Image: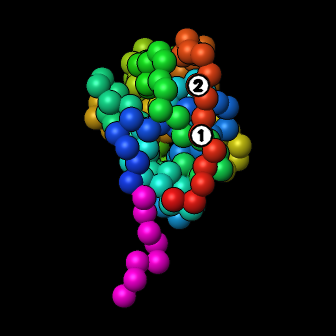
Amino acid sequence: MPNVFSQAFATATEYLYIDGDSVPFFKDENLSDFLFYLPKTYYAKIIYSNELYYKVEIYGGDTPMLDGFVPIDASSPTQKTDGDLFPDFSIKTSVNSPLYSDRQLTDVIQYVFSDRELRFYGYSYSAENESLIFVGYNGKLGFIKSTDVKSFTMPQNKVEEPETETHTDR
């Protein structure tokens, strides 16, 4: 039986340059389980792609790596990378706060005390359009309300915008 969902594997040096504030990162290949928006001016490493999405890898080092999916029309591949590939950025809680496993804010993973350091992954929103941040804390990943963290400015990667390739069906 032929594989109707063919996948082309990307080279190890192919990345997506995140050139806007609204490049979504999904948990599933159906692009139905939205997690967060990728930080502008950074990169996502392409694992493979098809006509619908790129499967990508983000972060690493002190911020645990994640695999996920980016819609094919949300960004374009490049082989040039300047600056840092991924942000190495932490934020701090301003109050005692729940860490949620879902954007509906119904499932509390654990409570986080005030002034605790959280690894930043990206921005998100609740079902009620409340601003959230997807973070890593104590080996767990989840959502925290933006109002529960100290004010911060996401650092921009100091790069010249790379030339991107025009996507063709792979």
* Residue shown at 50% from the left, 51% from the top: 54
On screen, residue 50 above or below 98: below
* Residue found at the far right of this picture: 129
Q: Magenta span has 5?
A: yes
On screen, residue 41 above or below 11: above
**Neighbour tally class for label 1: few under 14, some 14-19, many 20 plus, Cα within 10 Å:** few
Q: Which of the two residues, 71 or 32, is positioned nearer the viewer here?
A: 71
Q: Considering the numbered disc 1 on the image, is that residue within a helix, a strand or a loop?
A: loop
- Cα–Cα span, label 2 and label 1: 10 Å
| Residue type for callout 2 | Pro
* Residue shown at 44% from the left, 25% from the top: 86
| Residue type for callout 1 | Glu
On screen, residue 145 above or below 93: below
Q: Which numbered tag is attached to residue 99?
A: none
Identify the residue under disc 2: 162
* Residue shown at 42% from the left, 58% from the top: 8
Identify the residue under disc 1: 165
Residue 99 in picture, x, y percent from top left: 44, 37
| Res 156 → quadrant | top right
Q: Magenta span has 165?
A: no
* Residue shown at 54% from the left, 21% from the top: 149
Stretch of the chain drawn in magenta: 1-8
Q: Main secondary structure of the magenta part?
A: loop
